Image (cartoon, coloured by chain):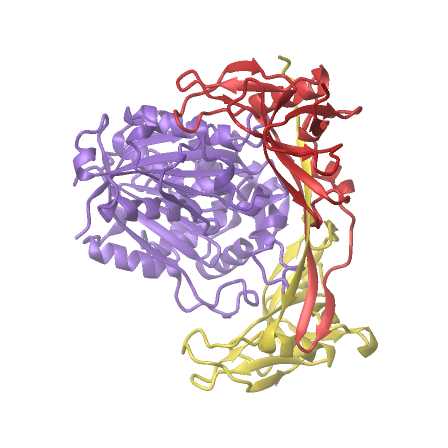
Chain colours: A yellow, B red, C purple
Amino acid sequence: MTAELLEIIIPLDLTYRWSAGPHLGAFLRGLKDGKIIANRCPGCGRLQLPPTPACGRCHIGMGEDWVELSHQGTVISYSFVVDPMYDAGIGDMRPVPYTIASIVLDGGPDVAFFHKLEESTPEKVKAGMRVEAVFRPPQEREGTMQDIIHFRTI
Amino acid sequence: MPDRKPSKYTDMLHLITPSKGLNVLSLDPYVAEGRLAMPYRYFPGPIATRFFLELRDNQRIMGIRCPTCGIVYVPPESTCGTCFEKLEEWVEVGNRGVLQSYTVTHYTLPVHPDHTPIIYGLVKLDGADTGFLHFLGEVENGALRIGIKMEAVFREERVGNILDIKYFRPASS
Amino acid sequence: MSERVAIIGIGQTDHRYIRSDINHEEMINEAVRKALEDADLTIRDIDTVIIDNMDLFEGHYLSDTMVVDGAGMYLKPGLKINTGGTSGASAVATGWHHVASAVFDTALVIGWQKQDASPSIAALVTAREPLYDRDMAAGAVGIFAGMGLSYMMESGCQEEHAALARVIMADNARRNPHAHLRPDLTVDDVLKSRVLVWPVRLLHMSPTSCGACALILANEKRAKKAAKHPVWIKDLETAHREQSVFRGGCVEPKPAISAIEVASFRLYKRNGITKPARDIDVWEFYTPSSWALFPWMELFSICDKGQAWRLVEKEAIRIEGEIPIEPSGGVVSTNPIGASGVIRVAEAALQLRGEAGDHQVSKKAETAIATAWGAASWIVMFYLSKNL
């Protein structure tokens, strides 16, 4: 028999429907309204961002003590994504380069917000730098993390 | 045949249609639709490769026999599960066999070919000890019964996979 | 009171970028046959089979069902495990529990991954929350970049030290016929390699590999009759962090405590290990990036905080050194993810048997620690010993 190389290519293309639930849902609806919302644990007083139903430390229900955080914050860590990568959510290569960062927003010292930075020049990004969320115009917001375009340096 | 190089992922992307990210269906309660589209590439290995190439090039269905228990597997396996023996003895099992079971589906899922009803059948080819699962076609109402003889129908254009067989139909004669 | 458990059979494939010559089941069969041959047993001597795999990478839900016959699982009891990067170690731990419980005398543990099937990073990223950060997250590289950056700032470690760590792993891998990447590297080569996310460069990260690794575990009664000197898994420990990376990035600005510290403190205390650098002869860590080596050496208490880079500078971690680390070349040389956790234990066991060939450590090896890391800072670690 020949040593012919046979390959079988089977693309998998599945559609999912995800329910955010009341807590993450409130956060995502908040984005549409131009707000970044966390919730506070009635036990230990710590914030969760994005909001969760239960506090991981106290093991009690978080309830609905919503806290609106500032749009300004401090970068604590970051990554420059430069390597091209395939994105299964869009069925295509993801546009690179871009910068992602963990940002501690004013008013929320124990949690970090994860999003993109406008700045992608390595020399211009530092831990400790101040940034501010840039939202899309209200009519373009849909209630997803993309309602924030990125965080710009201030 | 010249040795073909394995495809790169970027070569497979044309099989997937790009789309936007999440699609918000409802804000309260919040429901969004998203996607998971991945191109997968499988190398069948030497046993399955031979089986598929025989379908493609010779319109021939091959099985493989276990030296210890004597079972002839169709489609062929690399290892006999019962005996844990490596399988190497090829057996031609012909393209005709007996219908062991079948089921008629009256609705489709996205993975199905689009016509209904779709009939799956288990055919025990002459010389095989296992049933071979495939589609059944050219079936008139009331024509199917356990035990009738079936024959394989091959596609005109074959590429070297299980769909090179179009379906099994009730055998003529 | 639990049964004592030993490793009596070891088998692994040669790990490669692509295995276009065989399918998943045949690749697993290679490793299983080698393990059975090594233990001089047949599949009939195996009471239960534990197999692990990260399903999405090959696109098979219930990937174990596709490989039953070749894996020797036909009609046998067993389990399928998936815990992210640490799957292999979780599988070994599960096999250990099966035998330690006295329900089974022997267990076959199989770890495997065939990463030529898909763009793995896209599969990895689906561990992230789809509504929150999946479309921005980009795999594990960023985590190690953060680790590297913090370590450099706090300890005085330079890029050259991570480069040296990588060179040492390459030197080790060239002495290991099963390893995947076996380049002849210099520190300069590493420093010149493409930056992925600074300070992490391409050469600092593990490859995507295809491979399988199988271990046969047995209770004391069967181990004492084994063909080769049994290697005892004396103890194991698992820990993982809540508030993981997957719910909102690295949530805590400065993580208070690491799963590694928790797991290692518990394990060391139970086994009277007071000075790990002295009490343990060989270390097979699961470090997917050269930058993880330094903070993790310190978290495992091999040395004081801020000192790991000095040990690497002195090349104390080499195969000939006093604290040999990853003599197999480690995960940075070979990473078929589902198999990697099993490979760590297998390689540590080979060292204790004295069968590691060219990559056998120079010092006398009687005790070893094998670890794995994955997903939500999930750590599984094993304490292996030549003696009961």
What percent of the width, then of the height, locates residue C129?
59, 63
Q: Quadrant of residue C366?
A: top left
Residue, x 60% and y 54% (percent of image)? C125
Along the line of sight, the residue nearer the viewer: B4 or C44: C44
* Screen quadrant of the N terminus of chain A: top right
Left/right of residue C286 with respect to residue C18 in the rendered view: left
User: How many numbered marks are there?
Assistant: 0
Is any part of residue C335 visible from this angle?
A: no
Query: Image height check: is C152 above or below C220?
Result: below
Q: Quadrant of residue C43?
A: top left
Along the line of sight, the residue nearer the viewer: A125 or B47: B47
Q: Quadrant of residue C146?
A: bottom right
Residue, x 58% and y 77% (percent of image)? A23
* Screen quadrant of the C terminus of chain A: bottom right
Query: Image height check: is C313 above or below A100?
Result: above
Is any part of residue C327 visible from this angle?
A: yes
What percent of the width, then of the height, locates residue C177?
44, 25
What percent of the width, then of the height, locates residue A34?
73, 80
What percent of the width, then of the height, locates residue C191?
57, 42
Along the line of sight, the residue nearer the viewer: A142 or B141: B141
Residue, x 43% and y 49% (percent of image)? C86
Query: Image height check: is C112 above or below C30?
Result: below
Farthest front residue in view: B142
